[in-house]
Image (cartoon, rainbow, N blue to C red):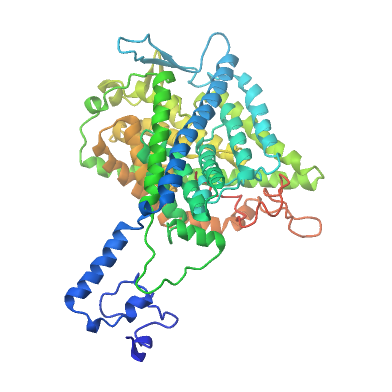
C-alpha cells in the first residue's frame, strides 16, 4: 500500500500530485502512467511480475482499443462507412461532372469562331488511348471579354446563395480544417457552402473544390449518425469518416485521403487525436480520472479502418466511372524519360524551398489584403446607409469582374486548373527533348517560361481576390496548379535546376509552406505525375525548407498578431463612425448573420490562415 511519504513525495512538483510532470524524477518515469500506477507498492513484486505488468501496459497502448469487440462496430459503424463510401462517391461525381460540364460549355460557347478552350486530342489509337496534340486558347490574350457575361453573373449568384437562411457569413465559411478541428458540422450552413462553391466552380472562379467536397462528406457522416441514432462519439467518428472519404475517393489513391486527414487532424487537435477527446472538447468537459490499472487507449486504428473502408468503396466507384466516361489519355513513361536522380538534386531543392516560402508568404499577404479591402468597402457602404445584403452581393460580383477581365489576357487563370494541368504536363514531358527545354511546345505555338511565370503570379492574385471577396472554395488545388506553372518556368531563370526536378518540388512546395501536410502532398504529386519515387527525397527537402522559413520561424504568426497595426499603416483598418466608436460591422455581419452563427470564431477576416482547406 502507499505510504504518507508516497503521497507527499517532495520530488512531485506543486499542483501535480498525479505525477503528470516527471522532469524532476531521477529515474525514467512514464508520464502516461496514472496515479494508481505510481502508488502501487512494487516492492512486493518480483522482477518477473513487474516485467509482466510493463509488458501488459505496453501491449495495451500499442494495440489500442479493441473496437472489433463491440457489436456496433460490425452492425452499425462498418455498414455506415460502406454506405458513406458509395454515397459520397456518387454525389461527388454528380458535383464534379455537372460543374465541369457547365463550365466547359460556356467557356467554349463564348469563344469566337470555332475555337475551344483546352486540349485537342488525336484520334483514338489501337489501345483506345488518345494523345494531347495542342492546348487551344491558353496563350496570352487568347481569352475573350465575353467570359465576363458569365463570371460576373456567376459571382453575383454565389453571393445570392450566401443570403439563404443558415448560409455562412461572407468570407467566414467553415473549412475542412475547422471541421477536422472539432469534428462538428453545421448542417444548416453546409447547403450554402456546397451551393456557393458549385456556382463558383461552374462559372470559372479560381477556387478549389476541396471545401465543398469535404463539407459533403462531413455532412453525410453526421446525417447517417443521426439516422442510426448513435451517441455523440459515433457521430463524430462518422463525421471523420465522411471527410476522409470525400478526399480519398477522388484522389489517385485512397491512401491519400486518410494520410491527409491524419496530418490535418494532428495540426487541428495536437493535444489528443482520439474521438473521445473531441467529445470532451465539444461538451466542455475535462479529462476524467481513470480507475486504478486502467488507461485511455488510442483509437487511431478504428478511425483508419472505418475511413479506409469508406475510401476504398468511394475510390472503386469513382475509378469505375472514370474508366467509362473519363478521357483515356496517353501519358509518357516518366521512368524512361526522366533523368536519373542525383544526390545533388537534394541541394537544388533548397533554393526551390526558399522560393516556395516567399511565394506562399506573398500569396497569404495578397489574400489578407483582399479581405481587408473587401471589409473596408463593406463597412463604407453600410455606413452610407445601404442594406447589408447589398454588400453580400456586391463583393463577390467585384471579384467576378476582376477575374473575368484578367482571364481574358491570361486564360490559364480560368477555373481550378485541374483539367488543364495533366494536359500541360503531357506536352511538357512527352519526350527527353521536351524535358530538356525550358519552354513548352504547344502545337505550332510556344508557351514561353516568361508567360508561365506571369500566369503563376496572376493565378495567385486572382485566387486571393476570389477568396478574399467572399467566393466559397478551397485553395489547395489552385495552389498546386500555381506551383506547377512556377516549376515549369524556373529552369529558364535557374538553368542548373532541371525541369524534371523543379516541377514536382514547386507543385507541392508552395502549399506545404503553410499547410502541414508534407507526406500526403508528396504522395499526391508522385502518383499524379508518375515520376520516379526517389524524386520524393528532393520534394521532402523543399517542403522542410519552405515550411520552416514561413511557419517554423513564426513570421506568419507574428504578422497575424500585428495585423491591426499593419492594416492601420496601409489605411485599411476599422472604419470609425462619427462618434469615434469603432464600427462593429465586419464580414460576419455583412450577410445578416446572427451572433450565434459567429460565436466562437476569431475575427480574422483580414488574414485568415485557418482557411487552408
Q: Nearer the viewer, residue 243 or 198?
A: 243
Residue at 60% over, 56% down = 602
Q: Nearer the viewer, residue 568 or 277?
A: 277
> Residue 95, position in %: x, y?
54, 29
> Residue 52, position in %: x, y?
21, 70
427 lies above or below 574: above
285 lies above or below 185: below
Q: Nearer the viewer, residue 181 or 104?
A: 181
> Residue 491, position in %: x, y?
33, 32
Q: Is residue 282 left or right of residue 435?
A: right
Q: Is residue 393 left or right of residue 114?
A: right
Q: Nearer the viewer, residue 481 or 215?
A: 215
Q: From where the camera sits, is residue 523 visible? A: yes
Looking at this view, name the residue that lies furthest to the bottom. 4
Residue at 64% over, 28% down = 154
Q: Quadrant of residue 433?
A: top left
Q: Is residue 50 left or right of residue 445?
A: left
Q: From where the camera sits, is residue 509 visible? A: no
> Residue 182, position in %: x, y?
52, 54
Q: Is residue 550 left or right of residue 95?
A: left
Q: Quadrant of residue 85?
A: top left
How many callouts does the rendering have? 0
Residue at 33% over, 78% down = 38
Residue at 52% over, 33% down = 458
| Quadrant for the N terminus in the image | bottom left
139 lies above or below 513: above
501 lies above or below 548: above
Amino acid at each position: 500500500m502507499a505510504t504518507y511519504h508516497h503521497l507527499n513525495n517532495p520530488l512531485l512538483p506543486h499542483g501535480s500530485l498525479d505525477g503528470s510532470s516527471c522532469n524532476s524524477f531521477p529515474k525514467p518515469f512514464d508520464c502516461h502512467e496514472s496515479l494508481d500506477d505510481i502508488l502501487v507498492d512494487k516492492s512486493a513484486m518480483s522482477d518477473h511480475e513487474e516485467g509482466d505488468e510493463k509488458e501488459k501496459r505496453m501491449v495495451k497502448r500499442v494495440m489500442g482499443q479493441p473496437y472489433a469487440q463491440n457489436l456496433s462496430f460490425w452492425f452499425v459503424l462498418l455498414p455506415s462507412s460502406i454506405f458513406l463510401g458509395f454515397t459520397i462517391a456518387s454525389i461527388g461525381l454528380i458535383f464534379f461532372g455537372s460543374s465541369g460540364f457547365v463550365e466547359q460549355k460556356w467557356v467554349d460557347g463564348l469563344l469566337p469562331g470555332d475555337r475551344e478552350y483546352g486540349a485537342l486530342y488525336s484520334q483514338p489509337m489501337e489501345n483506345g488511348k488518345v494523345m494531347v496534340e495542342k492546348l487551344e486558347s491558353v496563350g496570352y490574350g487568347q481569352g475573350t471579354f465575353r467570359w465576363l457575361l458569365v463570371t460576373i453573373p456567376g459571382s453575383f449568384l454565389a453571393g445570392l446563395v450566401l443570403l439563404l437562411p443558415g448560409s455562412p457569413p461572407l468570407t467566414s465559411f467553415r473549412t475542412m480544417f475547422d471541421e477536422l478541428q472539432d469534428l462538428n458540422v453545421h448542417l444548416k450552413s453546409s447547403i450554402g457552402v456546397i451551393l456557393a462553391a458549385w456556382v463558383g466552380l461552374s462559372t470559372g472562379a479560381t477556387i478549389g473544390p476541396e471545401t465543398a467536397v469535404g463539407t459533403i462528406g462531413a455532412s453525410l457522416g453526421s446525417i447517417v449518425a443521426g439516422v442510426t441514432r448513435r451517441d455523440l462519439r459515433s457521430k463524430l467518428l462518422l463525421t471523420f469518416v465522411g471527410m476522409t472519404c470525400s478526399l480519398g475517393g477522388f484522389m489517385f489513391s485512397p491512401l491519400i485521403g486518410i494520410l491527409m486527414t491524419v496530418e490535418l487532424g494532428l495540426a487541428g487537435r495536437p493535444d489528443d487525436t482520439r474521438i473521445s477527446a473531441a467529445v470532451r472538447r465539444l461538451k466542455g468537459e475535462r479529462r476524467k480520472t481513470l480507475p486504478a490499472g486502467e488507461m485511455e487507449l488510442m483509437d487511431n486504428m478504428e478511425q483508419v479502418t472505418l475511413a479506409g473502408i469508406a475510401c476504398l468503396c468511394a475510390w472503386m466507384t469513382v475509378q469505375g466511372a472514370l474508366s467509362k466516361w473519363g478521357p483515356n489519355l496517353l501519358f509518357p513513361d516518366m521512368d524512361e524519360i526522366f533523368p536519373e536522380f542525383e544526390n545533388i538534386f537534394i541541394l537544388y531543392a533548397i533554393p526551390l524551398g526558399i522560393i516556395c516560402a516567399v511565394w506562399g508568404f506573398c500569396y497569404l499577404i495578397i489574400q489578407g489584403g483582399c479581405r481587408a479591402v473587401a471589409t473596408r468597402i463593406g463597412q463604407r457602404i453600410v455606413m452610407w446607409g445601404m442594406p447589408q445584403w447589398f454588400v453580400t452581393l456586391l463583393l463577390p460580383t467585384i471579384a467576378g469582374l476582376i477575374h473575368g477581365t484578367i482571364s481574358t489576357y491570361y486564360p490559364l487563370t480560368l477555373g481550378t486548373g485541374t483539367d488543364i494541368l495533366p494536359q500541360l504536363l503531357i506536352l511538357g514531358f512527352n519526350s527527353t527533348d521536351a524535358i530538356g527545354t525550358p519552354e513548352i511546345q504547344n502545337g505550332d505555338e510556344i508557351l514561353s517560361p516568361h508567360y508561365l511565370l506571369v500566369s503563376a503570379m496572376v493565378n495567385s492574385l486572382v485566387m486571393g481576390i476570389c477568396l478574399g471577396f467572399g467566393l466559397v472554395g478551397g485553395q489547395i488545388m489552385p495552389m498546386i496548379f500555381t506551383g506547377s506553372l512556377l516549376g515549369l518556368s524556373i529552369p529558364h531563370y535557374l538553368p542548373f535546376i532541371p525541369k524534371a526536378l523543379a516541377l514536382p518540388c514547386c507543385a507541392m512546395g508552395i502549399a506545404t509552406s503553410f499547410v502541414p501536410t508534407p507526406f500526403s502532398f508528396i504522395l499526391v504529386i508522385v502518383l499524379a505525375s508518375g515520376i520516379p519515387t526517389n524524386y520524393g527525397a528532393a520534394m521532402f527537402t523543399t517542403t522542410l525548407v519552405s515550411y520552416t522559413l514561413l511557419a517554423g520561424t513564426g513570421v506568419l504568426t507574428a504578422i497575424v498578431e500585428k495585423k491591426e497595426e499593419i492594416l492601420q499603416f496601409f489605411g485599411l483598418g476599422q472604419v470609425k463612425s462619427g462618434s469615434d466608436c469603432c464600427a462593429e460591422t465586419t464580414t460576419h455581419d455583412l450577410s445578416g448573420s446572427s451572433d450565434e452563427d459567429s460565436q466562437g470564431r476569431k475575427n480574422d477576416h483580414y488574414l485568415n490562415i485557418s482557411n487552408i482547406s
